[in-house]
Amino acid sequence: KKCYECTIRNGEWETYPLLQPSRVLFAFKKYKQCFSKDTRGWGEGDGYFPHCDNHFVIEAKAPWALVAVEGADVRRTVKDERA
């Protein structure tokens, strides 16, 4: 990714590489504390708070596709064959 400076202010295009942040800041609401984790060497044990054994990485759930038909009243949508 590149970042471009304003041409009006500088008079020329300059490119700067954008750095990916390697540390992520987390806030633990229960203990009112913040901590940071390095994401470059993320392992299985890094998904836990450092003050307790609570797991803060939540597994992603796949969305379910569903097709449904809504109607006001079933008796009005189905034709009565008795008559």
Image (cartoon, rainbow, N blue to C red):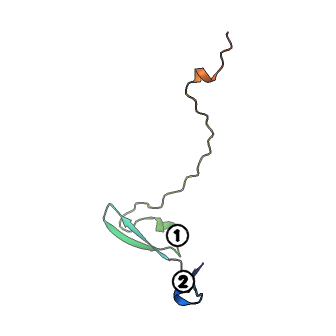
Q: Position of residue 70 (x, y in %)?
A: 58, 33
User: In terms of secondary structure, where does tag 2 sit?
Assistant: loop
Is label 1 or label 2 in front?
A: 2
In the rendered view, tell whether residue 59 sits above or below residue 24.
above
Upstream in sequence: badge 1 or badge 2: 2
**Which of the 4 quarters of the picture holds residue 33?**
bottom left
Amino acid beneath label 2: Cys
Q: On the rendered structure, is 83 left or right of 52? A: right
Q: Disc 2 marks which residue?
A: 6
Q: On the rendered structure, is 49 left or right of 69? A: left
**Which of the 4 quarters of the picture holds residue 2?**
bottom right
Compare residues 78 and 47 and report the one nearer the observer: 78
Compare residues 78 and 43 and report the one nearer the observer: 78
User: Which label sits on residue 43?
Assistant: 1
At x 47%, y 65%, the residue is 47
Locate the N terminus and report the quarter of the image it occupies: bottom right
**Disc 1 packing (10 Å; few <14; some 14–19; many ≥20):** few
**Which of the 4 quarters of the picture holds residue 15?**
bottom right
Amino acid beneath label 1: Gly
Compare residues 11 and 49 and report the one nearer the observer: 11
Q: Measure the C-alpha gap from mark 1 to mark 2.
A: 40 Å
**Disc 2 packing (10 Å; few <14; some 14–19; many ≥20):** few
Q: On the rendered structure, is 41 left or right of 79? A: left
Locate the C terminus and report the quarter of the image it occupies: top right
User: In terms of secondary structure, where does tag 1 sit?
Assistant: loop
In the rendered view, tell whether residue 32 sits above or below residue 15.
above
Q: Position of residue 29 (x, y in %)?
A: 34, 62
At x 58%, y 88%, the residue is 14
